[in-house]
Amino acid sequence: MEDILPFLIGGLYAGGVYLVFHKSFVKLIIGLIILGYASNLMLFTISRITRGAPPLVPEGATTLTEPFADPLPQALVLTAIVIGFGIQAFAIVLIKVGYRIVDTDNLDELNTTDRLED
Amino acid sequence: MENELLIVLLIPLLGGIFSLFFWKDIKSQKVIFLISATGLLLAATNLMVSVLDEGVITLQSAGWEAPFGISLVADYLSTFMVLLTSLMGLAVGVYTLGDMDRARMRFGFYPLMNFLLFSVCGAFMSGDIFNLYVWFEIMLISSFVLMALGNTKPQLEGAIKYVTMNIIASVFFLAGIGVLYGLTGTLNMADLALRIDSVPQEELITLAAIFFFIAFGVKSAVFPLFGWLPASYHTPPVAVTAIFAGLLTKVGVYAFIRFFTLIFNQENLFLDNLLLFTAGTTMFVGVLGAAAQMEFRKILSVHIISQIGYLIMGLAINTKLALAGVIYFMVHIVIVKSNLFLISGVVKRLRGSFELKKLGGVYGSHPFLAILFAISAFSLAGFPPLSGFWAKFILVKAGLDVQDYLIVAVALVVGFLTLYSMTKIWNEVFWKRMPDQDEYDKKHPPVKLWSMAPMMIPIVLLTALTLALGIFGEPIMHFALMTAEQLQTPEIYINKVLQISE
């Protein structure tokens, strides 16, 4: 498992960046979502994967014995996923409204605010 | 002691929640916002008084001790930023009483402003890097909605770029947190600062630093990550732009200062050079971009970039005097820049445009406004004895002290180019005759400035603050030096948060 995950994370980063470079709104958003997943997964794996060893103090003992899974990254990832979900929901609504009002699906045409004069 | 810190966060949070109860009642929302903004200013002042007494105040949430729980920390820098935030919140809040359209107010403008102030204050006082990420996200989502609120075409175009860049920044932020946690096994900033010195893999620390550099670089709009700023900052209403200009990019700079003085403070030639290079290019590109613009708000917003360069320059030089210069520059730029945006809103009300070509003759019709603009604009350009002069003087002096002549030269040239942009606005908006003035005057009855009292009061007060900052700068400078000293001895911060007795 630990051998596959780095490649998976790398693949997700690469796929996300590839999609972000597209001109279409929808591909941009999907790219951003995938980039978010890549970071979440990286955060999750950063303190090693420990299987079948929850961080629970066994009955009778007073401290944990190694090896045990670090619970903190899991909590962090959970928070990051929820926050990411909120932001993505907003971004999707934004591109939907943007598509209706700007009337294009091409990011290259979003250049009116950058122009020196209207 | 600890409660003073909590109250600062509770006031805007409660203000935001209560104004949600009055969703359709804009009047109540206005009253609630003014009460919460005033309360925030008082609470921040109160906190400042205590922090000046104590040095550093910490709050361990839910009583979990420092490296395990989430710490909230108020040291000189944090408290100072919170105080500035509350000041700008109140000033812009009063301004919106005169200049904000009903449609935007009906869709939650005031609750969002409350939540924005809440999250910005939280970001300044967070003592935990993951918690800082959460505050950043709250700030982002409030600012996303404020940016897009109103659904005009330019706003949505700007918002799409703003949202995209900031989501990418968040991705880098998370990755940086991941790398730091993997190296040290902690998220508490004080604990991190202790443990990072014993991490053997120096190149991984640099990697984490670069991740954070990109994340904060996007937020504070440094070269070459500033692309979203000129595309979006001038699109929302003036009040929103003023609060963004005053606060959001400064949160990025604050995070830079906090991380690079506390955590990444090891000798690292690559990072030092990266900061110095970024400072110089940011200043220069920003001021050139501003010089090319022909629209009031665009000149001001592109100009924000060049001012960020000065702040990063102080951080890159990293002597006591330079850091004090950053603090002084921060208060100067927040007040002056927001004030200039507010003035541009008044000019729009008087003349119906932001385009320099269509404007003119404001000096003839409203000399008082012209004087207010001149004070702020020349302060921005760095005329003695205004605040901008002292701010730049300190930074240049600090640069000369460490014999970084190149960055000093860039800073001075950028100062001159700033003057060019400001005199351009002065000539086009205030001095020259309006192209079709007679026709315009026929259609529009003359407007008296006092009829726009809610818009003018914050402008007059902020201008007075600018003047005071320049003429009676001694106490602020004294405080800035104290802050710089505290930043340069991170042990004070670390010992207080981790409760290590000396």
Image (spheres, rainbow, N blue to C red):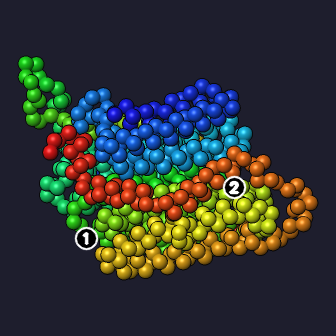
> The residue tagged with tag 2: helix, strand or loop?
helix
Q: Position of residue B15 (x, y in %)?
A: 54, 32
Closer-to-camera residue (B289/A47): B289
Q: Which residue is mark 1?
A: B269
Query: Is B130 left or right of B435, judged from the image as shown?
Result: left
Name the one closer to the observer, B423 or B355.
B423
Residue at the spot x=53%, y=69% of the render? B385
Quarter of the rendering containing residue A17: bottom left
Task: Decide: is A66 above or below B407.
Answer: above
Relative to the observer, which residue lies in front, B164 or B183?
B183
* Nearer-N-terminus badge (1/2): 1
User: Which chain is indicated by disc 2?
Assistant: B
Q: Position of residue B117 (x, y in %)?
A: 50, 42
Q: Amino acid at mark 2?
A: Gly
Residue B328, quarter of the rendered image:
bottom left
Quarter containing the C terminus of chain B: top left
- Chain bearing mark 1: B
Q: Quadrant of the N terminus of chain B?
A: top left
Query: Can marks 1 and 2 be said to lie on one chain?
Result: yes
In the rendered structure, the answer to whether residue B500 lies left or right of residue B157 reads left
Q: Mark 1 falls on what kind of element?
A: helix
User: Residue at left 54%, top 29%?
Assistant: B17
Q: Residue at x 30, y 75 (%)?
A: B402
Where on the picture, by quarter, is residue B234? bottom right
Is A65 above or below relative to B356?
above
What x and y, as percent, mark residue B45?
Answer: 45, 42
Question: Mark 1 touching mark 2, by CB under 8 A?
Answer: no
The answer to whether residue B237 shows anywhere in this view is no
Give amino acid for label 1.
Leu
User: Which residue is under mark 2?
Assistant: B345
Residue B94 in view, yes or no: yes
User: Which residue occupies 60% across, 47% down?
Assistant: B92
